Image (tube, coloured by chain):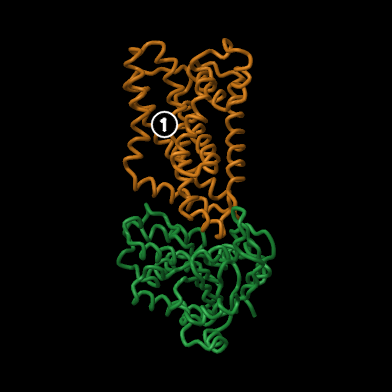
Chain colours: A green, B orange
Amino acid sequence: MNAVEVERLRVVRGGKVVLHDLSCGVASGSVTGLLGPSGSGKSTLIRAIVGVQRVAGGGVRVLGSPAGAKQLRARVGYMTQTPSVYGDLTVRENLRFFASVLGASRDRVEEAIAEVSLLEDADRVVARLSGGQRARVSLAAALLGAPELLVLDEPTVGLDPVLRRDLWRLFHELAEQGATLIVSSHVMDEADRCTALLLIREGQLLAQGTPAELRARTGAEQLDDAFLRLIETRS
Amino acid sequence: MSLRVTLAVAARVLAQLRRDPRTIALIVGVPCLLEALLKELFRGGPVFQHAGPPLLGLFPFVTMFLVTSITMLRERTSGTLERLMTMPLAKLDLLAGYGLAFALVAVVQAAVVSLLSFGLLGLHVEGARIVVVALAVANAVLGSALGLFVSAFAQTEFQAVQFMPAMVFPQILLCGLFVDREAMATWLRWISDALPLTYAYDALARTATGTYGSRFVVDVCVVGGCILVALALGAATLRRRTA
């Protein structure tokens, strides 16, 4: 069963084709890494999955409904690439606000703060936090509603290795509890932490499969090299 | 639409404003200063008595227009609007939340300026003072609604600020405060007829002279109608899907 089904998706932004009839799927319960260099169309694909991107053709189905459908709004959690939280509010105030919108409880707010390891900074104003901390507030907001599908645009950028490891652990725990995660990254060394991969470049799907499958197919040890070989065999 | 979400939006907007005491001081202090200046300039005479009530009632329009357009622009550029649009939130919840928050701010602003003007400065109106305050709040909501709408056409805060003179000054010039509407060239009066502040000003002027009449009811209805139209226009600029 696929949680997300992308069918010949075409997106044009400012007269430029950003996604070229891209098709792919995301298995339910997977931690799917969406990998590609910056400018490859990762964020656009993510925006299409959460239903905020205007599309020129094709379609996206999420949990059995068209992307962006009203009934999906409580079931999909979205973390934008730049932290989309209110800089002039504290961590807790931000999350309490988003929790009220989602109908989540106060306890859930405290849980989410703990999940992203921000308990000590919960009463600090977000604008005074570091970039990595701000990103975690944004992540916590996406976690609040205990969504069935979590779509995270570069959630681990700029984080120290310990935090990064903790977050990946959290992602896998959430998947074990039944959630599906899509995590984008432009760093290939995160690929090994995923159960499935979507490699995209210049708005096209290069390959999809598990890290082991991609290694087997390309004969490369490192996923970095696998990525390179896939590009070379294409051109 | 959900009351819970509307109240959450209003509480959040107010919490943000509370973090910015300087803005609150300016919102309340500047109209006080201007009323005091007007009084001193005209030594409390008929010009002050004529222009004082409209200034009191129209100032919240200008303030809330600015505050809302900037706040909403920030919401659009920071990505928080995009996040909210993926959440179970009706556009009306967001608009009503903003309207409610800034109406409350306007109540405080108008109350303080009224206390000063009617008390210390000796401003006098024939009608009820509370009507002046109520009209000020209605104008604030109108300003908020219009600010929300124009924020969609500004890419930067510089642009948003420039919309204020563009949208507000012509209305103030043509509303009848500076030149009697009867004395205007016909085509100017036609434009004046089409601008919401004309009706807001007329309602305030009638309250000042205590000559409400049926025209006052028309004024209030037009202002109310303009609020609804501006909110609908604002809602139309909130898109779940963007390019």
Query: Which of the 4 quarters of the picture holds residue B17?
Result: top left
Using residue A80 as the reference point, say whether residue A202 is left or right of it.
Answer: right
Q: Nearer the viewer, residue B112 or B236?
A: B236
Please report the residue visible at 42 percent of the width from the left and 39 percent of the height from the top. B105
Task: Specify the subunit that label 1 lies on.
Answer: B
Q: Nearer the viewer, residue B101 or A130?
A: A130
Residue A174's place in the image compared with B197, above or below, is below
Please report the residue visible at 31 percent of the width from the left and 22 percent of the height from the top. B120
Q: Position of residue B73 (x, y in %)?
A: 48, 46
Query: Which of the 4 quarters of the picture holds residue A53?
Result: bottom right
Q: Position of residue B124 (x, y in %)?
A: 41, 17
Residue A169's place in the image compared with B193, above or below, is below
For this orientation, the residue located farthest to the left is: A120
In the picture of the structure, the residue carrying the numbered disc 1 is B110
Residue A156's place in the image compared with A99, above or below, is below
Tag 1: residue type?
Ala
Q: Nearer the viewer, residue B107 or B85?
A: B85
Q: Position of residue B51 (x, y in %)?
A: 44, 18
Q: Callout 1 environment at 10 Å: few (<14), some (14 to 19), or many (20+)?
A: many
